[in-house]
């Protein structure tokens, strides 16, 4: 009996996420039915679009790369109790910095690529420090500060490519980076690039940091109970600032990998909101560094699958945004699901009596 | 006391409020256990008890902030159901919380009338009438509050009166004051008592919650003592005194075994000199606290709750900033060091508020069993955790301290309350280098666990460590301590040898020694 209960307790979180996903699927289905479309056909084309051919699967995974890396960026912060909603801005600045380093610096590939990625990390990390300082030493809510800091970052990059950096092509952007700064494509005929290894590496590194190091232990302690951590000698503010910096740096890396692997130059508005999707990706993954690889793929498929869906079932592409929103809504409401889940299985009992009996 | 008996009494004395058989639990903590309370009309009825005795929970149930699991409430002779505070306000029940619920950027009058403000043409605020009505109300009850000043510009004492005005404006019949003097200066407290007496003359019934016995004795008509979620007794003021109340408050139905005496007392390990500290409101909460703690002894700190014990413990581990004084450990000055350095210098502490400061509930058991030790060998080399050693440590402590956990990676939040406490006690006692500070180490534990913790503390003492025991339970302090220091209003009244004192003498000191005319 206890074993079943333990199993139930251990995996309850995952079950609830699955239920939330299922419910959002039902909600989307109802939406399609309401607009006179066949939800099953839509679902079929969605899967076909996401994974039907080698090219589509590669495309899905290519889109997973920035989502997963940025997802890790979010969860590193969230595990330490800081909610970095500014990943988008940090990602853009990281992309811009790395694109400039990739273009302007001339070095052998052995040094150039790492330098480029590092510059992305630095740009994102330093930008995040603004919100980190405000949070740790001025008690300013980081959700508000980071979400607002996304706008200066976006418009700064926009300004650079539109007004400052000379550009010959139609789309505003920086010049192409040097060949020495590129991450190679790894599957001929597709856009899949070596960034996938960076994503896996980042996941492993985040897991290692959080679970295997003293620092990670302290960061998790701060995230779960700040007061207890403080009482036991953890320098709470320092850990928060550190995790904010790491979060920003990884967000910047996500941008840098997009530059080095996919676009090879900073394109104005290249990010379809990776930084925002990353939050959903990380939450869906229950803040697990390996989980983001899975949920990132799911969101990548959402982006690729929606194309086939829109062609064959005549669904506007904006629906992807809507589906995203519906999923977020159900994830946000997971406590509601949890309570009815527990009530459904356990029934309502007069808790006081049971507790009182146990005490005696 | 059976409910029927209460009804009989009630009819004679015109009972305004009766709560019968109230039960309330939070998770597996029982906050109110079959509580009966009957309050006479027009009386000042005090409820006393230590923190966690269930006073505030009971009042929050009455005010509709919590729902009881069981029980009935009768108000003004009718059975009532109070689902939320607006129900309570409708009935004429008002509550002044410890933390005021005022809007600082609005004027006194605007706060008082909020939601019921006088209007012109049902749309525009009638500011003139607003101020005028507030002024009248203030004058009627002698509150001396100006209606047109901003709340952010007035003192804590006046803010409290604004809260009282708010309740009066809503035609309050029964006013609950939850530890109203906690944030007040002595002068402000005096003024408050004057206001309370004024209210009573006008027929308003008052429920006054406090753990300061002198206040209770000063203003109450009747007094209900609560302890561990139950009502110990309800008495008339004239039939009791502070010593009697103190006994009812801190006494425990635990069968305490006499502890073996200290074997060998060593050198002074920790020396505190003239320690002073302020709370967040810049009021002094510790005044020139000095004592020496020697190896091989247990120094007990006795006192009624809220007399500076918490702040003392928090200064010793570096959380509470001190304003002056010195903390010297093994000859080294360690005050003003960060928490980690102070702990590393040799202090282990069982925090008073366990769930908040003692545990990370979302950690598993083995992670919690090294909290604060993660940078020490063998659990890590300072950078990389050694989970094997962490696991070994967990297995060892689970066995030694009989922690009932299915496994070492079981989530701590799913353990029972007693076992969660054992996790903390095990960690702090087992790993404490020189000094163990135990703040309320047995609060909420059952008899067997209490016994166990006592044994552990004595074991540490006999192993040559210095133990500082802070407890609200006088019998616990008497049982374990080698010497006893009594705290009152942030000062140490006296430090006495256990053998040369009696509970009665200590009880008097706990009340500041200013009531020595009361026969013990």
Image: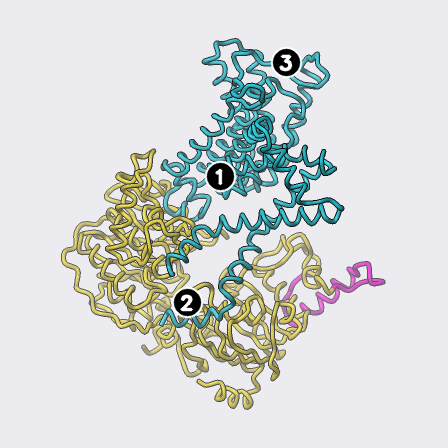
Q: Nearer the viewer, residue A275 or A83?
A: A275
For the residues labelled 2 and 1, the Cα–Cα distance comes to 47 Å
Spatial CA distance of label 3 from label 2 is 72 Å
Is B248 on the left or on the right of A163, as rendered?
left
Q: What's the colour of chain A in the image?
A: cyan
User: Does B255 sit left or right of A94 as displayed?
Assistant: left
Residue picked out by circle 3: A175
Residue B247 picture location, percent across and down: 35, 74
Quadrant for the C terminus of chain A, please: bottom left
Q: Are labels 3 and 2 assigned to the same chain?
A: no
Residue drawn at point x = 53 percent, y = 77 percent = B44
> Which residue range is magenta in the image?
B117-146
Residue visible at 31% across and 60% down in the picture = B301
The chain identifier of the residue carrying mark 2 reads B
Residue drawn at point x = 56 percent, y = 89 percent: B11
Gap between marks 3 and 1, in whole Å? 36 Å
User: In front of the other: label 2 or label 1?
Assistant: 1
> Which residue lies under the disc numbered 2?
B50
Does the magenta run of residues contain A195?
Answer: no
N-term-proximal mark, 3 vs 1: 3
């Amino acid at each position: 009996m206890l074993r079943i209960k333990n199993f139930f307790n251990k995996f309850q979180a995952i079950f609830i996420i699955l239920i939330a996903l299922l419910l959002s699927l039902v909600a989307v289905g109802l939406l399609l039915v309401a607009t006179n479309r066949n939800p099953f056909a839509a679902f079929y084309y969605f899967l076909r679009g996401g994974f039907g051919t080698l090219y589509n699967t590669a495309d899905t995974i290519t889109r997973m790369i920035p989502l997963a890396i940025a997802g890790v960026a979010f969860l590193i912060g969230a595990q330490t109790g800081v909610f970095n909603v500014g990943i988008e801005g940090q990602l853009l600045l990281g992309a811009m910095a790395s694109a400039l380093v990739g273009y302007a610096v001339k070095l052998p590939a052995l040094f150039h690529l790492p330098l480029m990625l590092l510059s992305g990390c630095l740009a994102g990390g330093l930008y995040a420090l603004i919100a980190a300082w405000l949070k740790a030493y001025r008690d300013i809510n980081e959700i508000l500060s980071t979400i607002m800091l996304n706008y200066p970052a976006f418009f700064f990059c926009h300004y650079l490519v539109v007004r400052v950096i000379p550009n010959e092509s139609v789309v505003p952007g920086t010049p192409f980076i040097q060949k020495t700064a590129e991450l190679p494509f790894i599957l001929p005929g597709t856009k899949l690039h070596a960034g996938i290894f960076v994503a896996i590496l980042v996941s492993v590194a985040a897991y290692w940091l959080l679970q295997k190091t003293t620092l990670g232990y302290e960061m998790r302690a701060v995230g779960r109970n700040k007061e207890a951590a403080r009482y036991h000698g953890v320098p709470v503010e320092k850990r928060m600032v550190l995790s904010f910096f790491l979060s920003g740096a990884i967000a910047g890396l996500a941008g840098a990998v997009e530059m080095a692997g996919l676009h090879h130059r900073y394109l104005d508005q290249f990010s379809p909101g990776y930084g925002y999707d990353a939050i959903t990706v990380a939450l869906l993954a229950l803040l697990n560094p390996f989980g983001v690889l899975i949920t990132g793929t799911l969101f990548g498929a959402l982006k690729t699958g929606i194309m086939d869906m829109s062609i064959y079932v005549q669904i506007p592409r904006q629906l992807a945004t809507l589906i995203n929103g519906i999923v977020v809504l159900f994830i946000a409401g997971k406590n509601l699901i949890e309570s009815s889940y527990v009530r459904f299985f356990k029934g309502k009992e007069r808790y006081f009596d049971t507790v009182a009996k146990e005490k005696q | 006391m059976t409910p029927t008996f209460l009804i009989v009494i009630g009819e004679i004395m015109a009972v305004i409020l009766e709560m019968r058989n109230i039960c309330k639990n939070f998770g597996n903590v029982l906050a109110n256990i079959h509580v009966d309370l009957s309050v006479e009309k027009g009386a000042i009825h005090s409820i006393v008890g230590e923190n966690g005795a269930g006073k505030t929970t009971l009042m929050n149930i009455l005010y509709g902030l919590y729902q009881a699991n069981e029980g009935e409430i009768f108000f003004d002779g009718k059975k009532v159901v109070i689902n939320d505070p607006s129900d309570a306000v409708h009935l004429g029940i008002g509550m002044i919380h410890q933390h005021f619920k005022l809007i600082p950027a609005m004027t006194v009058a605007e706060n008082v009338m909020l939601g019921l403000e006088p209007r012109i043409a049902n749309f525009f605020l009638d500011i003139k009438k607003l101020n005028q009505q507030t002024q009248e109300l203030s004058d009627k009850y002698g509150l001396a509050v100006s209606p047109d000043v901003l709340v952010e510009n007035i003192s804590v004492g006046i803010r409290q009166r604004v809260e009282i005005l708010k309740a009066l404006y809503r035609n309050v019949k029964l006013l609950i004051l939850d530890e109203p003097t906690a944030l007040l200066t002595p002068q402000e407290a005096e003024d408050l008592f004057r206001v309370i007496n004024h209210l009573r003359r006008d027929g308003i019934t008052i429920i006054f919650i406090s753990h300061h016995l002198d206040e209770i004795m000063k203003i109450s008509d009747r007094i209900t003592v609560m302890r561990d979620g139950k009502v110990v007794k309800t008495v008339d003021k004239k039939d009791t005194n502070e010593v009697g109340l103190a006994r009812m408050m801190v006494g425990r139905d635990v069968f305490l075994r006499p502890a073996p005496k200290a074997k060998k007392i060593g050198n002074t390990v920790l020396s505190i000199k003239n320690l002073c500290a302020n709370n967040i409101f810049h009021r002094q909460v510790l005044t020139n606290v000095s004592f020496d703690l020697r190896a091989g002894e247990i120094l007990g700190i006795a006192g009624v709750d809220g007399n500076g014990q918490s702040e003392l413990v928090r200064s010793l581990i570096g959380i509470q900033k001190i304003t002056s004084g010195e903390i010297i450990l093994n000859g080294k000055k360690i005050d003003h060091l960060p928490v980690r350095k102070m702990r590393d210098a040799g202090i282990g502490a069982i925090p008073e508020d366990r769930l908040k400061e003692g545990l990370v509930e979302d950690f598993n058991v083995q992670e919690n069993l090294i909290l604060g030790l993660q940078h020490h060998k063998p659990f890590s080399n300072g950078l990389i955790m050694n989970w094997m050693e962490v696991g070994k440590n967990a297995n060892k402590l689970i066995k030694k301290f009989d922690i009932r956990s299915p496994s070492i990676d079981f989530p701590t939040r799913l353990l029972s309350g007693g076992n969660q406490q054992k996790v903390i006690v095990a960690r702090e006692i087992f790993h404490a280098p020189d000094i163990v500070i135990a703040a309320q180490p047995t609060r909420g534990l059952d008899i067997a666990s209490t016994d166990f913790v006592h044994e552990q503390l004595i074991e540490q003492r006999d192993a040559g460590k210095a133990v500082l025991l802070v407890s609200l339970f006088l019998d616990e302090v008497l049982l374990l301590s080698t010497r006893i220091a009594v705290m009152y209003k942030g000062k140490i009244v006296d430090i006495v040898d256990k053998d040369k004192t009696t509970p009665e003498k200590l009880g008097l000191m706990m009340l500041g020694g200013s009531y020595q005319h009361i026969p013990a």
